[in-house]
Image (tube, rainbow, N blue to C red):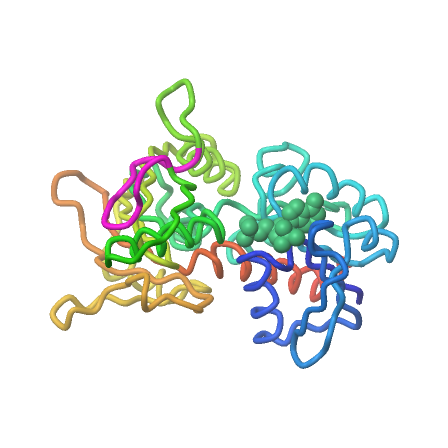
Amino acid sequence: MKLAVVGATGLVGEQILNVIKERGFHFDELLLVASARSAGKKFTYDGKEYTVVTAEDAIAQKPDIAIFSAGGGTSLEYAPKFAEAGATVIDNSSAWRMDPSKKLIVPEVNAKSLTKEDKIIANPNCSTIQMIVAIGPLHEKYKIKRVVVSTYQSVTGSGKAAVDQLFAERAVSAGQEQEVNKVYPHTIDLNVLPHIDVFQDNGYTKEEMKMINETKKILEDDSVKVTATTVRIPTVGGHSESVNIEFENEFDEAELRQILADAPGIIIQDDPANNVYPMPLTSHNRDETFVGRIRRDETQEKTVNMWIVADNLRKGAATNTVQIAEYLVSAGLV
Ligand code: A2P
């Protein structure tokens, strides 16, 4: 099994390599791929030295699986070329997500839909993934009518440069002289920006529309209504979401909690009396999705509120792609 990690030098690429090692995902040969700027650089991973290669070099070596996390442009250009050379591509960018011929996969919910014919598989947006892990099993049982979600998203979701902006601003606040390169249109330290990705004509941001459209695609149900407000906050790792879910059918709170507890990939942290609830800090480097603050919405029938947290670089990106790769291997699809 020849595995290529495209974007290996990026924030998500680094986590993909960590997750592969931790989970013991088996490969015989590993290709670390980055831009021409990094090609030729030495890279030590799991005690071995690798030389970073370009996408062209990697294609020539015909990998079996290529996990991409190198931005939408790189995916659009190179994913079809890797697929043509025989690789199954698992892509983290938004490039292929809404393409009707590509599947959008959260393994806990819809990996079974994959076949050998799927040569480019899309990984959903980080905020969508963690929400789907929690609402997927509830949709199956109670059928979701409408979801109202507000997110509290970490700067790591915007890549290394955004983390640098936050820490540079923090240094300036502490009286140090420091150049600040802005990724966001405003200061992010000690601030909150109701703005993730670009604004669309309808007043929503692209991130909000991703949550709306990707949710319907993964649940294979266009009747599910979703409305979203996505917000950037000055945390380093871990996205949080306040989610209000209205069902078609009545639910029993104890049964709903049991469904979540039994569902794969979920840990319930819900003991308010002891200040136990999911938080970004406690989700760091974890592969699970954490759910808490579960309570009936007292203003509306058949409706529940919950708080969902996951490490956006892990379950929101790296872990989800590696789980798809694990599924492909275990189901004999590569
Ligand atoms: P490089 O480090 O050479 O720029 P992040 O989002 O954290 O900034 O990471 C982006 C990742 O995508 C990096 O590993 C980056 O490599 C990689 N990348 C960017 N452009 C290309 C390309 N054309 N081919 C392969 N990898 C690319």
Up/down of 212 relative to 315, above or below: above
Q: Nearer the viewer, residue 207 or 149?
A: 207
Q: Nearer the viewer, residue 134 or 235?
A: 235
Q: Residue at x 17, y 45 (%)?
A: 297
The total number of labels drawn is 0
Q: Which residues are magenta?
A: 185-197
Left or right relative to 78: residue 308: left
Tell me the quadrant of the picture where the C terminus can be found: bottom right
Left or right relative to 265: residue 303: left
Q: Residue at x 55, y 59 (%)?
A: 318
Q: Position of residue 189 (x, y in %)?
A: 28, 50
The main secondary structure of the magenta stretch is loop
Tell me the quadrant of the picture where the N terminus can be found: bottom right
Q: Would residue 250 be seen by someone viewing this image from the given angle?
A: yes
Q: Position of residue 117 (x, y in %)?
A: 77, 45
Q: Nearer the viewer, residue 277 or 221?
A: 277
Quarter occupied by residue 75: top right
Q: Position of residue 120 (x, y in %)?
A: 70, 45
Left or right relative to 294: residue 317: right
Q: Residue furthest top?
A: 201
Up/down of 51 relative to 195, above or below: below
Q: Position of residue 122 (x, y in %)?
A: 61, 45
> Any magenta on residue 135?
no
Quarter occupied by residue 95: top right
Q: Residue at x 51, y 53 (%)?
A: 109
